[in-house]
Each structure stands twice: as C-alpha cells, then as structure tokens.
Amino acid sequence: MEKYMKLAIELSKKGIGKVSPNPLVGAVIVKNGKIIGMGYHERYGGFHAERNAILNAKEDVKGSSLFVNLEPCSHHGKNLPCVDLIISSGISKVYIASVDPNPLVNGKGIEKLKKNGIEVDVGLLSDEAKYLNRVFFKYITKKLPYVALKVALTLDGFIADSNGNSKWITKQNFNVSHSLRNFFSSILVGANTVLKDNPRLTCRNGGRNPVRIVLDRDGITLGRGFNVYNEEARTIVFSKCCQGTLECYPETEPFDILSRLYNLGIDSVLIEGGASVLSQFLNFADELHLFYSTKIFGRGLSPFENIIKFVSQNMEFKIRNLKRLEDEFYLEVFRNV
Amino acid sequence: MEKYMKLAIELSKKGIGKVSPNPLVGAVIVKNGKIIGMGYHERYGGFHAERNAILNAKEDVKGSSLFVNLEPCSHHGKNLPCVDLIISSGISKVYIASVDPNPLVNGKGIEKLKKNGIEVDVGLLSDEAKYLNRVFFKYITKKLPYVALKVALTLDGFIADSNGNSKWITKQNFNVSHSLRNFFSSILVGANTVLKDNPRLTCRNGGRNPVRIVLDRDGITLGRGFNVYNEEARTIVFSKCCQGTLECYPETEPFDILSRLYNLGIDSVLIEGGASVLSQFLNFADELHLFYSTKIFGRGLSPFENIIKFVSQNMEFKIRNLKRLEDEFYLEVFRNV
C-alpha cells in the first residue's frame, strides 16, 4: 500500500510553486491491484487532486481504493466537496496520510466518509505527508507564514570575512538553492543586502519566481533602480518611507511583518538576509538551510550576532538533512517543538 | 584480489595504538584461491606483518601470493629484511597497496623482489592504504608529527558561549572521540584548558592512553595537582618554568614544539586546546575533526580567533568524512595539498 501513497506524494510535488497557499495534494486510485487513475492539485483555484484522479480514471472507480496524502475536504468551496464526490463515485476504501488541520476540515472529512460506509485508513506515510505540507499546516493553524532561513557560512561559522566580503563563501549548489526559491512563496532580504549585492532574487532553475520582500525601514534603497525592484517579479517593501507605486507597508517588527504577509496570502518566506535580518527572524524560524564551505576565516561576521544564547539552553533545532555537496555541505534543521 | 588487500588493511588496524611510530601493516597469503596465512605488525619492535603471515601459514607458501598494504622492507633492522624472507620462502607474487616512502625503502623493496623473479603488483587500494598510514607517511617524509585538531562547536561556529562556558556544546559521540585518543600518539592542550576543565586526557573506551602534552609557557599549572599530571599516562610539558621531575622542554613556538615531538619519537598529535592553541596550530594541521551541535550562540568564542583569513583565499581543507551522530554531526577535513 505504501507504494501507492508514495506515488500520491510524488504527484503532489508537481504542484510546488503553483498551488500556494493551498496544500500539496496527490491522489492515486487502485482497483484489483492496478492503478486506474491519478491526479494532483495543479494550480491555485484548480480542481482538487481527488477530483482530477477520478476524472482521469480509465475504468469505473466503483469498488476501488483511493490513496491521498491529505484528508479530503468536506466544506463547500468552488466545487462539490471531495468527500461527496468520493461517496457518489462508489470508491470503497480511502487511505489518507494525514488529517487536514484546516479548522474547516480537521477530521470532518474522515467522519463523513465513514458514515457513508467507506472504509478509511489514516496514517500511511504520515511523517512524509506532514513534512510535505509543513508550510500549509503552519499557515492554516498559526495564521503566520512558514519561515525558513538560508545561510552560507564557513567551517567556523562566518557569513562574511573581516572585510565584510561574502562573495563567495560557498558555491551553494545552485540547484538546491534555487529549488528553495521555487518552494517558498516569498524571499526576504534587508536593505543592506540590496545595497551591497544588488540581487535579483529570482528563481533561475526553471521554477516560478518568489515574491520579493525588502525590509528597508529608512527607505535607503528606494527609487534607485536596484534589480529587486525590476519587473521580473512582484516586490513588497516594508518601510517607514513608502513612496511612488511600490507595494509598501509600514511594519518594522518581525511578528508584524509576518502577520502582514499572512494577511496578503503569502504562506511562506525564505529569509536570505545578512546578520541583522537573520538575527531578527531566528526566533520565528521553522527551519534553517545552512550551506557550509570548508573555508576558515578566524574572524568575521557571525550570522546571528545580534543574539546571545548560552550553552545551558536547550537545543532549539534538530537535524532533518545533512548532505555533502562536493567540497561543501548542506545542513537542514527544523525547530524542535 | 581487492578482498585480500581489504583484509590485509583490516588486519593492520589491530596495530592501532601499539606500533607507533612504525606503520600499520597487515599481510595475507593466498594459494589456489584459499587464504593460508595472515599476520600483522602487532607492536613496536615486534615482527613485521609479512613475517607473521609466513610464520602463521598452515601450508607451504611456495607458489603463493602475498597481499600487503605497504612495500616490504629491504633494509636490515632487528631481523632479516622482509624482502629476503619473501624471496627465500618461494612466494611467487606480491601485491602491494602503497610504496613505503621511508627513504630506506622507497621502491628498493619492490626492485629487489622483481630482480629475484617475483611478480609485483603495486597500487591495489592505494588510496585506502595511504589514508591508513597517513601518520607514518608524514612522520617519515616531513620529520614532523602528524597534526590533527579536534573542535566541538555550535551551528554558528562557537566553541564557548559569551560567558566562556563550553560544557557541553556537543555530546561528541564518546566512541569517535575516544577512538581518536587511541589513534593518535599524543594529545595536546593549553594551560587554560587544564585550569578550566582539569581533564584527564586519557582514552576511556578500551584503547591505550596517548602521551599528554601541556603547553604552559608561564608554568601556571605546575605543582598544583591537576589530573593531567597524574600517573595514568606519560605527560610532557612545554614551559619556560620547568621544575621538579616533570618531563619538560622549553620550546614555545608551534614548529619548535612539533620538531621536539618528532625527535621524541612521537609520530602524531591530537590538539584539543582552546582558541589560542587551535589558532596557533591551524597552519600545521593535517586534518580537523569537527563535532557540531545544533545549538546557536549568536556570540561567543571562535575556535581560530587569533587568525584572520579572507574569502578570496583558497580552500585549505577538503572533506573526507561527514556523518550524522544522532542530533549532532561530525565533519572530518584534511589539508588540500
């Protein structure tokens, strides 16, 4: 059974960068040991995965099993709820990887399926399914975007040398790095990064561009033609000096900024800032993506230099992924909740 | 053929901690596809691996093949050179993983075998064999001990928090850490580490104790009953204030200290010191063993704070090993020569 759920999860990933702030969902329909239908949630506002799988089915789905990584919806949206569709289709068993924590669903879909005589199995590959939709789960339950920090540092933990130079500490494996820009809905930097590096902040390995966010309290980057303000993608500025036609908001505190993003429907943010921005947002971070080179600076700029913590404090983060990338390595940690 | 060389290498490792400053050598004798003899260099001053393998052989070795990870010796030591023993034994083929860079050997053993009609194959698993005897190779060619630095640090590169506390940044996987103490002949710390932690510096997972070395230029730890001066193991002090019955030398500069250790027959040193000692010896380091926790300090003590290097400089070290140890990770890098 796992292989079908695995396939549903893989299918769901085709929606990365396209369905936000909806969850990633894939569905597989199996009858007599044969896959007869597959589908996934393809774009925001599009059909749900279950509906697509049923529409794509090559045989009558009556008596079949449905594998779906997220609990089918039971609330009325643009279309008939998936639960009603499943019931009327004659599907007899539904495997669900994880419950949908959306207060509108949250077990109600499962309940309705059971009441209508459909066998329901919950929990197959649930860890994988929860990881897959970690952005959606945070967004829907905490009413805040999912926050990821990305840092490139030396073996001894510096993000710039003592002259302030950071180009290039790591080669940062282009693909991992740009895949993050496709995965997260927005990318955030501080004004200093714009002044210093003039980045475009676009996704350049085939994915869609994230919304670009600049924290520029004092407006020092405004009206100066920096790349981040070009037409390639939407840009949002947080500043006390909003001007012109820019999309600009006055918040300056991390929590207020994140709340504003939530209200704008932005479900996740990848923070690539310098030490000031990284330090400000560390306490809000759900995960960190760290790219280490084997360089050693001795002295330099530390990523979280505006923070002071002690050895006696608990570990805030746990390792999710550790991977060698040629002569560098990549570490992904997540908040230990 | 690789499997026999692999076995020879595994056998040689039984000599770790016992043969220094001799190389680690294992030998396997194969006849008609069957292993008929095995041996290794068991202790300093003991028989060489080749001799042990021949002595242990259960059949006549005439016409057999010998697998040995290091070129057999051709110079007269306490016993007949291994090369002469091999020739007289009737062994017909010798597989050698790596040439012995010892100026007394360095190809002469191979030459003599060939001259006497023995077929010689050089290079099977040579990378593995060179790594195995990296200590011996450095010691014999550079006339300096092999230098390894061991550091426990946070995700953001600190070896102590801003209060100076370092207990415990990592759990440091007891076994990896104490295996290093068995592998290297000596362990070196600065006076500050003795004052602060009062460590015993012994090997406590079944290996032999390394020689303990304390850098205490001004003699601030002397005559005060610190653990490092107890009877558990030999201790050498480098100080301007040598006193009493201590084994004590006056050198204070890293190169002079390392030269002294070479002259004392100490082939390798594991440096576990604080920032001052680590910074002093970084330029002499052949490899670094880094234990990272997922803690973040923001600010604190950097391991190489007395050094300043820049992003434009080349990478000095390359990754040899990267391994997750539960909630921590271990990185081994070696000098990129």
Image (cartoon, coloured by chain):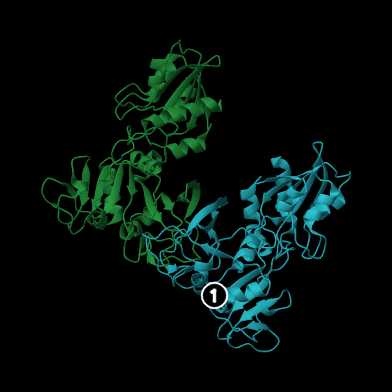
Chain colours: A cyan, B green
Q: Residue at x 45, y 30 (%)?
A: B10
Q: Which residue is mark 1?
A: A254
Screen quadrant of the N terminus of chain B? top right
Relative placement, left or right, of B44 versus A77 is left
Image coords of residue B145 (percent x, y): 33, 45
Residue at the farthest left position: B244
* Label total for image: 1
Q: Residue at x 79, y 53 (%)?
A: A50
Image coords of residue B34 (percent x, y): 53, 16
Looking at the image, which is closer to me, A104 or B131?
A104
The answer to whether B68 is drawn above or below residue B21 in the figure is above
Task: Report helix, strand or loop for mark 1.
Answer: helix
Q: Residue at x 68, y 79 (%)?
A: A229
Image coords of residue B255 (percent x, y): 31, 53
Looking at the image, which is closer to me, A260 or B97?
A260
Identity, as a three-letter code, of the amino acid under mark 1: Pro
